[in-house]
Amino acid sequence: MKGSRLRRPFGGRGAALLWALMFLPVLLLALAFGVERVQSVTEGDVDVQRALEQAVKAAAMQVTPESQAAGRPRIHAARALAAFERMLAANLGLDPATLSPLAGSALKERPDFVLVVYNGDASFAAGGAQAAWKYRFSGGVLTGGPLTAAGFPCRFGVTSSDVLPGGGGTINVTLDMPGCVGVVSAKGRNVLGRTPLAPVRYAAAKIVCPSGACGA
Protein backbone atom coordinates (compact mmCIF):
# COMPACT_ATOMS: atom_id res chain seq x y z
CA MET A 1 0.00 0.00 0.00
CA LYS A 2 1.05 3.54 -0.72
CA GLY A 3 2.64 5.14 2.23
CA SER A 4 3.14 1.87 4.03
CA ARG A 5 6.60 0.71 5.05
CA LEU A 6 7.93 -2.78 5.58
CA ARG A 7 8.81 -3.28 9.22
CA ARG A 8 11.77 -5.35 10.20
CA PRO A 9 10.96 -8.17 12.58
CA PHE A 10 13.79 -6.87 14.84
CA GLY A 11 14.86 -3.35 15.45
CA GLY A 12 18.44 -2.36 16.21
CA ARG A 13 18.16 -3.73 19.72
CA GLY A 14 16.54 -6.91 18.48
CA ALA A 15 19.41 -7.56 16.05
CA ALA A 16 21.94 -7.07 18.79
CA LEU A 17 20.04 -9.52 20.99
CA LEU A 18 19.92 -12.05 18.17
CA TRP A 19 23.71 -11.86 17.68
CA ALA A 20 24.24 -12.14 21.41
CA LEU A 21 22.14 -15.31 21.54
CA MET A 22 24.07 -16.76 18.60
CA PHE A 23 27.47 -16.18 20.20
CA LEU A 24 26.50 -17.01 23.78
CA PRO A 25 27.11 -20.78 23.39
CA VAL A 26 30.56 -20.04 21.96
CA LEU A 27 31.38 -17.76 24.86
CA LEU A 28 30.21 -20.34 27.39
CA LEU A 29 32.28 -23.02 25.68
CA ALA A 30 35.34 -20.79 25.87
CA LEU A 31 34.77 -20.16 29.55
CA ALA A 32 34.24 -23.86 30.17
CA PHE A 33 37.45 -24.65 28.33
CA GLY A 34 39.36 -22.12 30.42
CA VAL A 35 38.06 -23.50 33.70
CA GLU A 36 38.69 -27.09 32.64
CA ARG A 37 42.20 -26.22 31.49
CA VAL A 38 43.12 -24.60 34.80
CA GLN A 39 41.60 -27.50 36.72
CA SER A 40 43.48 -30.07 34.63
CA VAL A 41 46.82 -28.31 35.03
CA THR A 42 46.32 -27.91 38.77
CA GLU A 43 45.22 -31.51 39.36
CA GLY A 44 48.00 -32.86 37.17
CA ASP A 45 50.64 -30.86 39.01
CA VAL A 46 49.31 -31.82 42.44
CA ASP A 47 49.04 -35.53 41.59
CA VAL A 48 52.60 -35.75 40.26
CA GLN A 49 54.06 -33.66 43.08
CA ARG A 50 52.41 -35.68 45.84
CA ALA A 51 53.29 -38.98 44.20
CA LEU A 52 56.91 -37.90 43.81
CA GLU A 53 57.20 -36.68 47.40
CA GLN A 54 55.91 -39.98 48.75
CA ALA A 55 58.11 -41.97 46.37
CA VAL A 56 61.28 -40.10 47.40
CA LYS A 57 60.44 -40.53 51.09
CA ALA A 58 59.89 -44.25 50.58
CA ALA A 59 63.26 -44.48 48.83
CA ALA A 60 65.08 -42.68 51.63
CA MET A 61 63.65 -45.11 54.19
CA GLN A 62 65.45 -48.12 52.69
CA VAL A 63 68.21 -48.18 55.28
CA THR A 64 70.47 -51.24 55.43
CA PRO A 65 70.32 -53.27 58.69
CA GLU A 66 74.11 -53.18 59.08
CA SER A 67 74.33 -49.40 58.91
CA GLN A 68 71.33 -49.01 61.18
CA ALA A 69 72.91 -51.27 63.79
CA ALA A 70 76.15 -49.31 63.58
CA GLY A 71 74.36 -46.03 64.18
CA ARG A 72 75.35 -44.76 60.74
CA PRO A 73 72.22 -45.29 58.62
CA ARG A 74 72.84 -45.56 54.89
CA ILE A 75 70.36 -46.18 52.07
CA HIS A 76 70.30 -49.39 50.02
CA ALA A 77 70.33 -48.08 46.43
CA ALA A 78 68.50 -50.94 44.68
CA ARG A 79 65.81 -51.15 47.36
CA ALA A 80 65.41 -47.39 47.21
CA LEU A 81 64.70 -47.61 43.48
CA ALA A 82 62.18 -50.43 43.99
CA ALA A 83 60.36 -48.47 46.72
CA PHE A 84 60.40 -45.33 44.58
CA GLU A 85 58.86 -47.09 41.57
CA ARG A 86 56.32 -48.93 43.70
CA MET A 87 55.08 -45.76 45.39
CA LEU A 88 55.05 -43.80 42.13
CA ALA A 89 52.99 -46.52 40.46
CA ALA A 90 50.52 -46.76 43.33
CA ASN A 91 49.83 -43.02 43.39
CA LEU A 92 49.73 -42.32 39.65
CA GLY A 93 47.82 -45.40 38.48
CA LEU A 94 50.73 -47.14 36.78
CA ASP A 95 51.64 -50.75 36.22
CA PRO A 96 54.21 -51.49 38.96
CA ALA A 97 56.32 -53.63 36.59
CA THR A 98 56.43 -51.40 33.50
CA LEU A 99 55.18 -48.02 34.83
CA SER A 100 52.74 -47.88 31.91
CA PRO A 101 49.47 -46.05 32.70
CA LEU A 102 46.60 -48.29 33.76
CA ALA A 103 42.95 -47.63 32.91
CA GLY A 104 41.81 -44.53 34.75
CA SER A 105 45.32 -43.11 35.19
CA ALA A 106 45.70 -39.36 34.78
CA LEU A 107 48.89 -39.93 32.78
CA LYS A 108 49.00 -40.37 29.03
CA GLU A 109 52.22 -42.39 28.92
CA ARG A 110 55.02 -43.70 31.12
CA PRO A 111 56.75 -40.97 33.12
CA ASP A 112 60.46 -40.24 32.88
CA PHE A 113 62.40 -39.85 36.09
CA VAL A 114 65.84 -39.44 37.63
CA LEU A 115 66.53 -40.67 41.15
CA VAL A 116 69.78 -40.03 43.01
CA VAL A 117 70.54 -42.05 46.14
CA TYR A 118 73.28 -40.29 48.10
CA ASN A 119 75.05 -41.79 51.13
CA GLY A 120 78.13 -39.59 51.13
CA ASP A 121 80.61 -42.45 51.60
CA ALA A 122 81.08 -46.11 50.73
CA SER A 123 81.33 -47.44 54.30
CA PHE A 124 78.43 -49.84 53.75
CA ALA A 125 78.69 -50.37 49.99
CA ALA A 126 79.15 -54.12 50.49
CA GLY A 127 75.61 -54.23 51.88
CA GLY A 128 74.12 -52.36 48.92
CA ALA A 129 74.51 -48.80 50.20
CA GLN A 130 76.73 -47.36 47.49
CA ALA A 131 78.25 -43.96 48.17
CA ALA A 132 76.21 -42.25 45.44
CA TRP A 133 74.09 -43.75 42.67
CA LYS A 134 71.93 -42.29 39.93
CA TYR A 135 69.03 -44.04 38.21
CA ARG A 136 67.47 -42.72 35.02
CA PHE A 137 64.21 -43.99 33.52
CA SER A 138 63.59 -42.51 30.05
CA GLY A 139 61.45 -43.80 27.21
CA GLY A 140 60.74 -46.96 29.18
CA VAL A 141 64.45 -47.80 29.59
CA LEU A 142 66.14 -47.87 33.00
CA THR A 143 69.85 -47.13 33.38
CA GLY A 144 71.97 -46.57 36.45
CA GLY A 145 75.50 -45.85 37.54
CA PRO A 146 77.72 -44.47 40.29
CA LEU A 147 78.37 -40.84 41.07
CA THR A 148 81.32 -39.31 42.86
CA ALA A 149 80.55 -38.85 46.54
CA ALA A 150 81.88 -35.75 48.27
CA GLY A 151 80.74 -36.25 51.86
CA PHE A 152 78.40 -33.78 53.53
CA PRO A 153 76.95 -31.34 52.87
CA CYS A 154 76.45 -32.02 49.19
CA ARG A 155 74.57 -29.75 46.80
CA PHE A 156 72.58 -30.95 43.80
CA GLY A 157 71.28 -28.95 40.87
CA VAL A 158 67.85 -29.95 39.59
CA THR A 159 66.76 -29.38 35.99
CA SER A 160 63.62 -30.50 34.19
CA SER A 161 65.28 -33.79 33.27
CA ASP A 162 68.28 -34.35 35.54
CA VAL A 163 69.84 -34.15 39.00
CA LEU A 164 73.40 -32.79 38.91
CA PRO A 165 75.92 -33.22 41.77
CA GLY A 166 77.56 -29.94 42.68
CA GLY A 167 74.61 -27.78 41.70
CA GLY A 168 74.17 -25.71 38.59
CA GLY A 169 70.55 -26.54 37.80
CA THR A 170 67.45 -24.36 37.89
CA ILE A 171 66.90 -25.39 41.52
CA ASN A 172 69.57 -26.29 44.08
CA VAL A 173 69.06 -28.80 46.89
CA THR A 174 71.56 -29.50 49.68
CA LEU A 175 71.74 -32.80 51.56
CA ASP A 176 73.54 -32.68 54.91
CA MET A 177 72.66 -36.30 55.65
CA PRO A 178 72.06 -39.44 53.52
CA GLY A 179 69.02 -38.98 51.30
CA CYS A 180 67.44 -39.05 47.85
CA VAL A 181 66.66 -36.45 45.20
CA GLY A 182 64.22 -37.15 42.39
CA VAL A 183 62.69 -35.39 39.39
CA VAL A 184 59.74 -36.64 37.34
CA SER A 185 58.40 -35.54 33.96
CA ALA A 186 54.97 -36.89 33.03
CA LYS A 187 52.44 -36.24 30.27
CA GLY A 188 48.88 -36.06 31.51
CA ARG A 189 45.65 -36.67 29.66
CA ASN A 190 43.66 -33.69 28.38
CA VAL A 191 39.94 -33.29 28.80
CA LEU A 192 39.87 -30.52 26.21
CA GLY A 193 42.49 -29.19 23.83
CA ARG A 194 45.28 -30.87 21.94
CA THR A 195 48.35 -29.89 23.95
CA PRO A 196 49.23 -32.62 26.48
CA LEU A 197 49.88 -31.57 30.04
CA ALA A 198 53.49 -32.22 31.03
CA PRO A 199 54.16 -31.27 34.64
CA VAL A 200 57.76 -31.56 35.85
CA ARG A 201 58.31 -31.85 39.58
CA TYR A 202 61.17 -32.56 41.98
CA ALA A 203 61.44 -33.66 45.59
CA ALA A 204 64.14 -34.52 48.11
CA ALA A 205 64.15 -36.49 51.36
CA LYS A 206 66.88 -37.25 53.88
CA ILE A 207 67.46 -39.41 56.92
CA VAL A 208 67.04 -37.53 60.17
CA CYS A 209 69.07 -38.83 63.12
CA PRO A 210 68.58 -37.86 66.79
CA SER A 211 72.23 -36.83 67.06
CA GLY A 212 71.90 -34.67 63.96
CA ALA A 213 74.84 -36.26 62.18
CA CYS A 214 73.87 -39.88 61.39
CA GLY A 215 77.38 -40.96 62.34
CA ALA A 216 78.85 -39.17 59.33
Image (tube, rainbow, N blue to C red):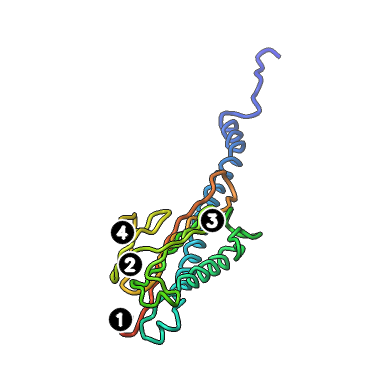
Instruction: Say the numbered circle drawn on residue 167.
Output: 4
Comparing labels 1 and 3, the label whose residue is closer to the camera: 3
Q: Which residue is mark 3?
A: 141
- Disc 4 versus disc 1: distance between alpha carbons? 23 Å
Q: Residue at x 45, y 83 (%)?
A: 65
Relative side of 84 to 2, left or right: left
Q: Which residue is mark 2?
A: 149
Residue 75 spot, x, y in % from top left: 42, 75
- Disc 2 versus disc 4: distance between alpha carbons? 13 Å
Mark 4 is surrounded, within 10 Å at the Cα level, by few (under 14), some (14 to 19) or many (20 or more) other residues, namely: some
Q: Earlier in the sequence, mark 3 or mark 2?
A: 3
Is label 4 in contact with label 1 (beta carbons under 8 Å)?
A: no
Relative side of 181 to 188, left or right: left
- Disc 1 versus disc 3: distance between alpha carbons? 38 Å
- Looking at the rendered structure, the kind of residue marked 2 is Ala
- Looking at the rendered structure, the kind of residue marked 1 is Gly
Comparing labels 2 and 4, the label whose residue is closer to the camera: 2
Q: Nearer the viewer, residue 72 or 203?
A: 72
Comparing labels 4 and 3, the label whose residue is closer to the camera: 3
Dot 3 falls on a residue whose secondary structure is strand
Q: Which part of the image, by quadrant, shows the N terminus?
A: top right
Q: In this orientation, does residue 174 appear?
A: yes
- Disc 3 versus disc 2: distance between alpha carbons? 25 Å
Relative side of 208 to 13, left or right: left
The quarter holding residue 67 reads bottom left
- Looking at the rendered structure, the kind of residue marked 3 is Val
Q: Nearer the viewer, residue 116 or 29?
A: 116
Q: Nearer the viewer, residue 100 or 127?
A: 127
